[in-house]
Amino acid sequence: MMDSMEDNEMFPEQNDTVVESMAEESTVSNEPEFEVIGTVEPQSQPELATIGEEEPVVAAPKSKKKKPVICLMGEFSAGKSTLSNLLIQTEALPVNVTATQLPPVWISKGDDIPYRVALDGGEYDIDLANLEDVSVEDTNHIRIFHDADLLDKIDLIDMLGISDPNMDAEVWQRVIGNADAVIWCSHATQAWRQSEAAVWSMMPPELHEKSFLLLTRMDKILSERDRGRVVKRVARETVGLFYDLFPISLTQALAAKEDAEKWESSGAAGFMEALEELIQEIAGEVTEEHHAEVRDESDIPMRPVLPTRVQPRKLQARPTRQRPAQDGLGDPLSGF
């Protein structure tokens, strides 16, 4: 103790220096030092509601729903037109139309003027009586309207041109990306030909589990045993390619009208019930962001050589006035 006191007395200047140093340290902030590299603007805070005021409710953003789009596909004389007539209960197109020479036909609810959508997105009024004037080369699709109950729930795209093997696959490929499901019609007497399988192999794989295969014209196969053999063979050859398979006579279904027994025996009852379930399933998950992609050609198996046919004559579009832009129709491929 005495030694400590003596040290303080012997070194008064040193002691004062220590005290001053301790005093300076006590004034230094304990917060860590940071280099200032910029300024941060203060964020505005939401105003608090006063007593008696109602606070606004902000809904979370939702994806806009659109109608499911179902494509009707199949080769020549497989029953696509009859199927569309059955679904919308009227003739979608004039009976004198040569189906193989038309671009895809998009059918929606309404009574608007029919028009075509060019490859550049332009819209041009057309006359259904002169559809042969529509050019396949520069038309993405034709848009027509009908007042049918089913069209309250879905849009249909009739892929007419797929019947002609000489028509470039790009004609249907540039539209198929809008499909949520496909109904493929295959003539029962020649069911699921190699040419059909080749085209189907080019489809977006996500369509497989939401598409139906219809074996049409089953009434042309008279033997029940033969009908069973056809269904069994096609089911075996298309495992995993379709959601379900339905043997059906579309002409008998149309003729059945209110006859429940004929409707059932035509095969239409089971198909329509399954279609309704499929529409409900798709409607619960479809948004405007949906857009399937066609498979890259490098992923597609080599197509078999098809018989050469006479090249269809090239069609020239007549001059038509440009359609004014309309809400919801400017880019029909993005929604409705």
Image: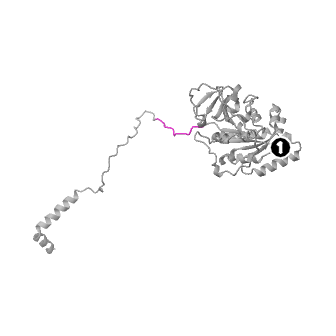
Decide if residue 34 is on the left or right side of residue 307: left
Q: How many marks?
A: 1
Measured as percent of width and height from the top left, residue 197 is found at 73, 48
Measured as percent of width and height from the top left, residue 229 is found at 84, 49
Residue 59 magenta-drawn?
yes
**Which residue is labeled 1 in the image?**
189
Q: Is residue 124 above or below residue 27?
A: above
User: How is the protein colored in the picture?
Assistant: one colour
Residue drawn at x 37%, y 42% as measured from the top left: 43
Task: Place residue 53 in its image quadrant.
Answer: top left
Residue drawn at x 73%, y 34% as measured from the top left: 99
Residue sitting nearer the eye, 222 or 132: 132
Measured as percent of width and height from the top left, residue 88 is found at 73, 31
Residue drawn at x 65%, y 34% as measured from the top left: 141
Residue sitting nearer the eye, 21 or 316: 316
Residue sitting nearer the eye, 133 or 149: 133
- Main structural element of the magenta stretch: helix, strand or loop? loop
Q: Can you say which quadrant of the picture contains the C terminus?
A: top right
Q: Can you say which quadrant of the picture contains the N terminus?
A: bottom left
Residue sitting nearer the eye, 97 or 289: 97
| Residue occupying the far bottom of the picture | 3
Residue type indicated by callout 1:
Thr
| Highlighted magenta segment, given as a residue range | 56-65
